[in-house]
Each structure stands twice: as structure tokens, then as C-alpha cells.
Amino acid sequence: MNDIIKNIKERRSIRKFKEEQIKDEELEVIIEAGMYAPSAHNEQPWHFTIIQNKDIISEINKESKMMMKNHSDKWIAKLGNNEKFDIHYNAPTVIVVSEKKDCYSKFVNASAATQNMLLAAESIGVGSCWVGFSKFCFVQEDKIKKLNIPEGYEPHYTVALGYKALDKKQSAPKRNEDVVTYIR
Ligand SMILES: Cc1cc2nc3c(=O)[nH]c(=O)nc-3n(C[C@H](O)[C@H](O)[C@H](O)COP(=O)(O)O)c2cc1C
């Protein structure tokens, strides 16, 4: 198995982080990996907002959970009501992944960039988690003014980043096997 395949298979969603901030050099590697993702028409329609300010990260958590509390899905509502739950798992760095509102293949470009960043993080020993719960904050446009998202872009996801605070390697959730059709 080559290093890339190993990295793809070993990356896990990390939900427990150390308080220590990641290094700027590591952050640069991760962001650059996002910028090297494929994009429809080579539009590169993404924008990354790096947040390392605890108050802003905490505000996104608070605003997301306020919305989650009243969600029709009981699991989401329960997490919204859980005082201890932090949608970014207290990660010291959060990247907001935004995309041009009028781009080709909406969401897909931002998703490709997000996955590249997760894999880059894993390859240099930084833990990461793709977080969709932040969407509950982002749908409230007045709540995201402080993020200075460029005009014409909208935030889709966040990525939690930090050093892993795990005693042992996390095993992968079982993968569905019946998902391939060969036509030869
Ligand atoms: C679009 C998307 C949104 C996600 N949102 C969340 C989230 O809000 N919180 C979370 O803990 N994990 C989130 N995840 C991570 C998935 O739960 C995780 O990828 C899945 O359980 C498989 O585990 P693995 O990443 O370790 O392979 C998200 C993943 C994707 C692709």
C-alpha cells in the first residue's frame, strides 16, 4: 500500500483535541492542499476563513446549537441541548469553507477542497473533523457578519483542526461493501 492510500485509509474524524495550537507551517500546508483540489471549469470558487479566536469559535458553536435545539430530528435536538457538546470539539483552529454562490457544481468544489485539507492534515499528524453542524449558524446571515466572508460567497462547512488527544489509534467505522458495480 503506498503512502497516499495508507493516508486515505487511516484518516479518521477526530473529536478530541489538545488545547495546543497547531503550527502556522502546518496550517499553510493544509490550506494549500485545499487550494489544489479539482474544481468544475477550474473555477477554484472557494474561500477559506481561518479562525483561531476562541470567542468567535465559541459564538459559532452557540449560534449553531441554538438552532439545533428546535430541530425535528431528535438526535440533532439532543446535541443542541447538551451543554457539554461543542460542534468543533474544542479544536483550537476552525476553517470555514465557503464557495461562490453562483459557481458550477455547487457544494462539490468546496467538498473536494475540504477532503484535500483533511487528508493533508492527517499526513502531517494534525487531527481534523469535517463539521456540517456549523451550517445551523451559517443559515442565520446576521450571525456571520464578523467572519467577513467575501461578497458573493457563502459558507458551507467548517473543518476542526488540532493535535489529536487520543490514547490509541481510532478504528474506522465499518465501510459498506455493497456499493460497487463492475461493467466489463
Ligand atoms: C458533509 C459532512 C458533514 C459532516 N458533519 C459532521 C459534524 O457536524 N460533526 C461530526 O462530528 N462529524 C461530521 N462529519 C464526519 C462524519 O461523521 C464522518 O466522516 C463519518 O462518521 C465517517 O468517519 P471517518 O471520517 O472517521 O471515516 C461530517 C462529514 C461530512 C462528509
Image (cartoon, rainbow, N blue to C red):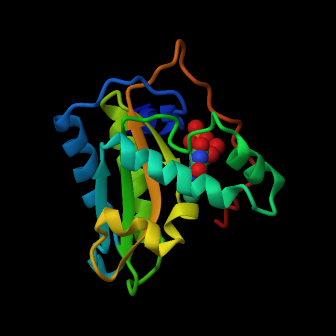
Q: Residue at x 41, y 46 (%)?
A: 57
Residue farthest to the top? 167
Q: Return the x and y of residue 178 as percentages of the image width and height.
A: 77, 52
As displayed, is residue 27 above or below residue 133?
Answer: above
As displayed, is residue 70 above or below residue 121?
Answer: below
Tell me, yes or no, if residue 38 can be seen here.
no
Nearer-the-camera pick, 55 or 128: 55
Q: Residue at x 47, y 20 (%)?
A: 165
- In the visual, does 47 lie left or right of 74? left
Q: Residue at x 52, y 71 (%)?
A: 140
Nearer-the-camera pick, 178 or 47: 47
Residue farthest to the left? 25
Tell me where residue 84 sits by quadrant: top right
Q: Return the x and y of residue 74 as percentages of the image width and height.
A: 83, 53
Nearer-the-camera pick, 39 or 131: 131
Q: Return the x and y of residue 41 as percentages of the image width and height.
A: 31, 82
Q: Which quarter of the figure is the C terminus placed in?
A: bottom right
Residue farthest to the bottom? 102
Q: Return the x and y of residue 143 as percentages of the image width and height.
A: 45, 66
As displayed, is residue 133 above or below residue 20?
Answer: below
Q: Residue at x 31, y 43 (%)?
A: 53
Tell me where residue 21 sits by quadrant: top left
